[in-house]
Amino acid sequence: MSLIRKRNFTEDDEGSSKRQSAKYETMAKFYNTNPDQQHLILPRKPEGILIGRSSSCDIKITGVDVSSKHSKLSLANNKVRDYFFLTDLSSNGTFVNGAKLGHGSSVLLKSGDKVSFAKTGGVFIFRYLLDEVNEENKKRSLFDDYIVGKQLGSGHYAIVKEAKNRLTGDIVAVKIFHPNKTSKDSQEDEAKLQQEIDLLLSIDHPNIVKFINRYVEPINQHSVSTYLIMEKVNSGELFERIINKSKLREDETKALFKQLLSGLFYLHQKNIIHRDIKPENILLDITPRQSGQQQQTGPWDENEYDIKVKIADFGLAKFIGELQFTNTLCGTPAYVAPEILSNQINYTTKADLWSAGVLLYVCLCGFPPFSDELAPPNMREQILTAKYAFYSPYWDDITDAALDLISSLLVLSPEERYDVTTAADHEWFRESVSQEDMVMDSLDSTSSKNSLQRSSSMGSVQREPLRNNSHPLSFRHKFASELNSLSYQ
Ligand code: ADP
């Protein structure tokens, strides 16, 4: 059992506490998990705080296996805020969250970390004191506000975990970007970035993943990690739905695409270009149907009451840097607009409409319009020349209106390409694909011929036979190996 003698920094040592606080401001506390033992006050002492059995230590703790100088807390600072490093100087170990640090090793302490000194030196919860921090230290730490939980997924730039708000109990998703060097940006650049981030934080639309907060946490003196707190979306990605179903029904696609356009309209009104619209970035919130009698909100599957589309990952370039973002984007360009691929700098919101066109194509037939499987020419050339086709038989049963909308989106010249308003106003959204039509079509042996000729105000769109040597590769086929690990069922 540890015994903490009244030393300079224990809480009930009034006289010395006053002396110390007069000299150093309190920066953090070790809260003793044993209610009969004292908490420890950790002052902002520039030379650091020694903890151990020796009376020369700033904080004296006893215990049979505690070393005379057991651990040291060192004050450090990077651009984000001041923080403590804990260094293990002991023979029997300093433990942080159950893991032994190892003699001579250090770790940055986060609020909520559980620290123990050997077996008998006591167990403490570490916490920075936010109310007492000075002006420069106002920024709160993520770990003060959230308990970070299980991993939800990982992507190019980040991993995504679940987290629980300590105060409200709300469950959110937290995107943890790979560590970055501490920025050397000027104050002006930082203010501009903050302004852009504030704009992203102000976004509030039912079809866009809500962005709740941003934290920048120090990893060490040279690097930081950015954490984005977002609304948690529970039913996986559109990408997984396409793989699971091979392709989506036209009525279902229409209902989902309408919501996508609604979210894009909101972003574009605020002059935000997403730049990375693809099925992996379209998340779905599915409410299950309680019973067969419950009226569904749209043309969903039998067991689904409602589906909300949530556009994710907008504004990413702000967090990972323009260069890295553009490089990754153009590395796998299946959805990327030709003007971005050819490095034109003055691209506009129309770039998202191109990507939306690719996405619509993929939803309806299950494979992408541009791919190396359809070479020659290679995918890049196909995009740069807007070379794609609606292959028969895959497109035979899809309405002309759908093909016409895609053809109005996959247009090389951004000026001639539909914008979000004209897309949302397209005839496809006005005509409903009646169940009756579809049943009739499937019963009719000449259905593909019929649908080729289905009347439409925009005239019939050509379906092309596939060339003998080219084969579109369906998502389901291409990503079959990932099927088992997907969360959407
Ligand atoms: P990256 O942008 O680095 O590629 P992603 O944003 O694609 O990373 O996220 C990786 C994974 O985390 C994806 O599988 C995605 O489904 C999941 N994910 C991302 N955002 C959320 C969220 N808000 N709610 C639930 N899951 C999410």
Image (cartoon, rainbow, N blue to C red):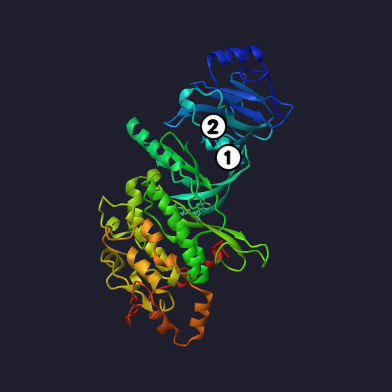
Helix, strand or loop status at disc 1: strand
Please report the residue visible at 48 percent of the width from the left and 26 percent of the height from the top.
137
Where residue 482 appears, as percent x and y from the top left, is 50, 66
Q: Name the front one of labels 1 and 2.
A: 1
Position of the C terminus by quadrant? bottom right
Q: How far apart are marks 1 and 2 (CA)?
A: 22 Å
- Left or right, 156 with respect to 14, comes to left
| Residue placed under numbered mark 2 in the picture | 86
Quadrant hosting residue 296 = bottom right
Position of the N terminus by quadrant? top right
How many numbered discs sit on the rendered protein?
2
Residue 146 disc label: 1
Please report the residue visible at 40 percent of the width from the left and 57 percent of the height from the top.
277
Where residue 435 appears, as percent x and y from the top left, is 53, 75
Where residue 344 appears, as percent x and y from the top left, is 25, 53
Quadrant hosting residue 306 = bottom right
Name which residue type carries label 1: Tyr
Residue 226 disc label: none
Q: For ligand 1, tell me if the residue under mark 1 lies within 8 Å.
A: no
Relative to 339, residue 221 above or below = above
Packing grade of label 2 (10 A; few <14, some 14-19, many >=20) is many
Relative to 73, residue 409 above or below = below
State whether residue 286 appears in this view: yes
Relative to 349, residue 436 above or below = below
What is the residue that sits farthest to the right in this orientation?
Answer: 36
